[in-house]
Image (cartoon, rainbow, N blue to C red):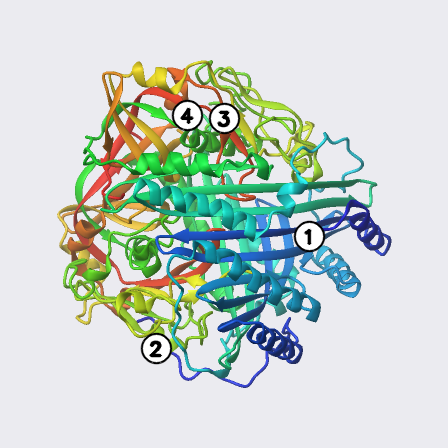
Amino acid sequence: MLSQDDAQTIASSLLSRSNADGCEIVLSGMREHNLRFAREGATTNRTAERISLRIASHVAGRVGAVEIASLDEAEGLAALARSEEIARALPRDRDYVPPLGPQRYEESLRYREATAAAGLDVLAAKAETVVAEGARRGVATFGQIASGAGFRARATSAGLFAYERASEIELSTTARNFRDDWSGWAGAKSNDAEKLDAPSVARRACAKAAQSETPRDLEPGGWTTIFEPEATAELARWLLHALDARAADEGRSCFSKKGGGNLRGEKLFDEKLTLSSSPRDAFAPEAAIGFEGAPQRARAWIDRGALATLYLDRAYAKQTGAEPIPCPHSFRLAGGDATLDEMIRATKRGVLVTRLWYTNMLDPRALLLTGLTRDGNFLIENGRIVAPARNLRFNQSLYALFGKIEALGPAEPTWSALYDEGLAAAPPMLVENFGFSSKSGGI
Amino acid sequence: MNAPLPPELKLGQAHAAGALDEAALLRLADLALDLAKAQGADYADIRFGALVTEYLRAREDRLEQATARTDRGFGLRVLRGGSWGFCGASALTEAALRDAVETALANARAVQRIQLEPIVVEALPAYTARWIAPAAVDPFAVGIDEKAEFLLAVTAAARDAGADFCTASFLGAREERLFASSRGSRIFQTRTRVQPDFSVTAVDKASGRFASRDSLAPARAAGWEHASACGLIEEARRAAEEARCKLFAKPVTPGKRDLVIAPSNLFLTIHETVGHSTELDRSLGWEANFAGTTFVKPPMLGALRFGSPLMTIFADRRQEGGLATIGYDDDGAPAAYAEFDIVKDGVFQNFQMALGQAHLVGLPRTNGCAYADNPRAFPIQRMPNISLAPNAAQTSRDDLLAGVEDGLYVVGAGSWSIDQQRDNFQFGGQLFYEIKQGKLGEMVQGAAYQGRTLDFWAGLDGLGDASTYELHGVFTCGKAEPIQLAPVSHGAPCARFRGVEVLNTDA
């Protein structure tokens, strides 16, 4: 982990040796721990450190980049020279943008010293609470706990220097009954190790798995469905991925307008849908430094159902005369006032979904998504959970799904893998007529 | 097969532009392993590695990105008192190694509180070896300007043929590894792989519709000769026409249909339904929390009817151009261990295994299926090349089509999704054509096929011969936590499947 001063010293030294018209330096590194456990206990674990130095040289409107896993000065200078050589070998880029100058960044809220200091012994103690809960509930537990801390620094020949640290800890647990015909899951993630409630994760996963009743087979069709927050977040993340201004303008996107242009400003979804990102979000803070060094700001991507903002890189921003907007990684899907219990009580016949699996886009124009439920479906009848229910595949348009939302609960932090796709906050969500297309035998 | 199995690979030739200082690494290996044993490790191994990559991407008339990358580091694994401990780092220094020994042993002690059953590993023989995969044209010796010009020629060809948009990319990778173990193995290996690619899009702004057609060119363990000879420019022209055709093609009629599937699509179905379902660590539950488990259980060895008698799926690490072709796996097991049938004449025969798993199913040793996607990663069970054996009897693609009254011909990989036990799957494709009375007909759009793994493979009733066999693969098969990405190839002939559910995804 390099300090801000050390990162700036290394970057400045390299920039001073650049022979190019412009130069960008990105330094990053991290130290992380993880351990996994299964039926027999601990399986794999690791502590790993990595460092990366990326140099992009700008020569006559062309950019060549080299990345190495070393801070050695000689190797850095060799990489600098090679990046200039690559740039000279390329054709001129008509959309060339020079290195970014100084920017104003929001304060980053993603680092906690205690999380950075949490080693494998801390993780093993938390994992032990999960294993113990499984033994108490009579289910087998499987899972992973991971923690890490890292930094990223960016410096350019145009005078930019930015530095940011982040720490994360995450725990996810799958519990399976000893007949191996039912499972449950729970997870949590935070920048702050002290906020990771391992016993709560263990209780939730094991309670879902400890079902004695035989799971029911549900028939495919349109179902009233309540998604728990992780499942809602999985669906919302696909919306986030689609917010590319260039694709929309070029007619290659669900947000393209017939005849040309994009659908920004138009109400496309239920007015309960607000999807936003902010470095100051209390549950899911976005990184302060975005793609290409552009600052992340508080932004509404979808605001009360209307498409508000699309992201665009610096090259496309230059082409269109707009400001660059970096793509988001962390997000919040705003919640509502309904509780999960209220949603269940309001459901005559439906299914409660814990999480989703292997989602993939079938048709990007219609936002048609496929995937499956996993690790904890429950059948609801006349306002009560009556039985566990086997998994189903869905093929569902997200336009239709988010076009009519019956109810939302309060947003809460959701799980995602370490350093994977940022952080997210999402609510439980009740919808009608969710399209389950086929049965799955997978438990 | 499309190529005979290679002769003995050349040993004793250091790669001309190696990123690793071999002599220095051997000294570091000795230091780390001796120290680990002295401090209480029952077994230890270490992987040093460098991965050199070059990635270029063009879109329309711009060369959008050109990046050369070298990743480097080591990963030390110790077994102490029945628990693994692992530590990896980027720095290849004595201080980093000493720290890693201490940390790995501390990690092994830390996890003992949840080690319900001790880890037991088999004693593999020690090997001293050097293995280098031949590449006819070193991709790193080809100038960046030549590569850029090539990619811009691909995008130009697509646009000249009517595409609205085209991206073309090239990824070249050279992986160098030293594996050393406390049993005495010292194995140097070098291999090269390339992935040429493009995606073409046709847009109809009036209707707001668009259609894409991705390249069918396979990723391959090879050099620049594969990228320059795989016909990408000609294919881009054809793809532009096909994307526009796809835009206005009639919608597919859903329902149960017979499918003839080209290798360029079938390889991914093999990967998802057979490759992943027969991984022993999944069956043992070790991947239950993320990648999932499997419907295949140890008592099914030699007994489970996986598919029709036409179905023989074999594993290997020797196919020329195979992305998992290598001399030794990342546990130090030789490639010869990874020559086995997974399914023979339709019956399940063997799991894929890594170190420390075989005894759990009453077998003596690993069958050589370990890989770590970078040296700082804990090696886990990953697929070797896994392929569907072609028909020994002469059978062309047209012979397979001739046996279909009303079906679909499927080309190229599209969307993919399968449940966590590898049962319910759904796959798209790049191109779908009607088959009517044994002949190829019109293109249709909006198709995907969905099924249950055992039902699907039971419906295999036609298999092409070696003339239809192609080797395809992926650079980035994902598994484990944290996720690791492994390169793997799958060979397949054309094949016919009866009664598969076809969806219209536009409906």
Foreground pick, B399 / B172: B172
Residue type at the position of mark 1:
Pro
Tell me if label 3 and label 1 are in contact, CB under 8 Å.
no
Q: Quadrant of the C terminus of chain B?
A: top left
Q: Position of residue A68 (x, y in %)?
A: 68, 59
Q: Disc 4 is attached to a residue of which chain?
A: B
**Gap in Å between the C-alphas at discs 1 and 4?**
36 Å
As measured in the structure, the alpha-carbon distance from the residue carrying label 3 to the one carrying label 1 is: 49 Å
Percent of width and height locating residue A239: 47, 29
The picture places residue A327, in percent across and down from the top left corner, at 59, 34
C-beta proximity under 8 Å, tags 1 and 4 = no
Is the residue B47 above or below the residue B377 in the image?
Answer: below
Q: CA distance from mark 3 to mark 2?
A: 57 Å
Chain identity of mark 1: A
Label 3 sits on a secondary structure element that is strand
Point out residue A317 in the picture as x, y percentages from the top left corner. 67, 32
Q: Earlier in the sequence, mark 3 or mark 1?
A: 1
Question: Mark 4 or mark 2: which comes first in sequence?
Answer: 2
Which numbered dot is residue A91? 1
**Above or below, comparing residue A216 to residue B412 in the picture:** above
Q: Residue at x 14, y 63 (%)?
A: B309
**Dot 4, how many residues are within 10 Å of its Cα: few (below 14), some (14-19), or many (20+)?**
few
Examine the rendering and report whether any part of residue A35 can be seen.
yes
Tell me the residue at 62%/42% (across/down).
Answer: A115
**Spatial distance from mark 4 to mark 2, Cα to Cα?**
50 Å
Tell me which amino acid carries mark 4: Ser
Determine which residue is flagged by label 2: B4
Q: Which residue is mark 3?
A: A412
Q: Which mark is residue B207?
A: 4
Q: Are marks 3 and 4 on the same chain?
A: no
